[in-house]
Image (cartoon, rainbow, N blue to C red):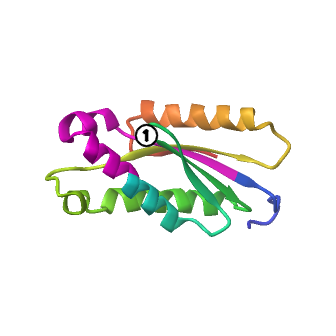
Amino acid sequence: MDQGEEPNRCMVNMVDVDDFKSINDTYGHATGDSVLIHLANIFSSLIREHDQVGRWGGDEFFFIVRNVSSDEAAKLIQRIHTAVATYDWAAKLGVADLKVRISSGYAFGNGKESIRDILREVDLNLYTAKQNGRNQFVGG
């Protein structure tokens, strides 16, 4: 933890698969489903045992990362994006030219905000990442 940051600080990160509809339309729904399964495995491998990741719905995933500084959170999200960008999707799924990219929005809470307020900020940050060109993360 960075000095001065509260020890119970929690980060919520929402990840959305960029152009997921195009993946389904181009490669089929079975491939789209496989992409989601592989993403879940990638995400699970990158978090600590006491943190959580889950599918929010459709092509969105959420992370709850406890006791994390701003710097640690940014590094984790960068690792997530790098892992997805460098994953050999074509070889793993047997589909030529498949590339998967994600956008993320994240925010912090310390137990004083409502979950609704945190999710609103996360959603706004994810929207900003999408509007600014996708394949990036926004938050703080």
In the rendered image of this protein, does residue 22 appear above or below residue 41? above
What residue appears at the point 45 percent right and 36 percent down from the top-left corner? 58
In the rendered image of this protein, does residue 140 appear above or below residue 21? below
- SS category of the residue bearing label 1: loop
Q: Nearer the viewer, residue 138 or 62?
A: 62
Q: Position of residue 53 (x, y in %)?
A: 57, 55
Chain part drawn in magenta: 11-36
What residue appears at the point 31 percent right and 33 percent down from the top-left corner? 21
In the rendered image of this protein, does residue 54 appear above or below residue 46? above
In the image, is residue 28 part of the stretch drawn in magenta? yes
Q: Position of residue 116 (x, y in %)?
A: 73, 32
Q: Is residue 134 left or right of residue 115?
A: left
In the image, is residue 78 part of the stretch drawn in magenta? no
Q: Position of residue 61 (x, y in %)?
A: 51, 46
- How crowded pointer 1 is (Cα within 10 Å; few <14, some 14-19, many 20+) is rated as some
Which residue does the numbered mark 1 point to in the structure image?
Answer: 59
Magenta stretch: helix, strand or loop mostly: helix
- The quarter of the picture where residue 106 lies is top right
Q: Is residue 121 left or right of residue 92?
A: right
Q: Amino acid at mark 1?
A: Asp
- The quarter of the picture where residue 28 lies is top left
What residue appears at the point 81 percent right and 39 percent down from the top-left corner? 113
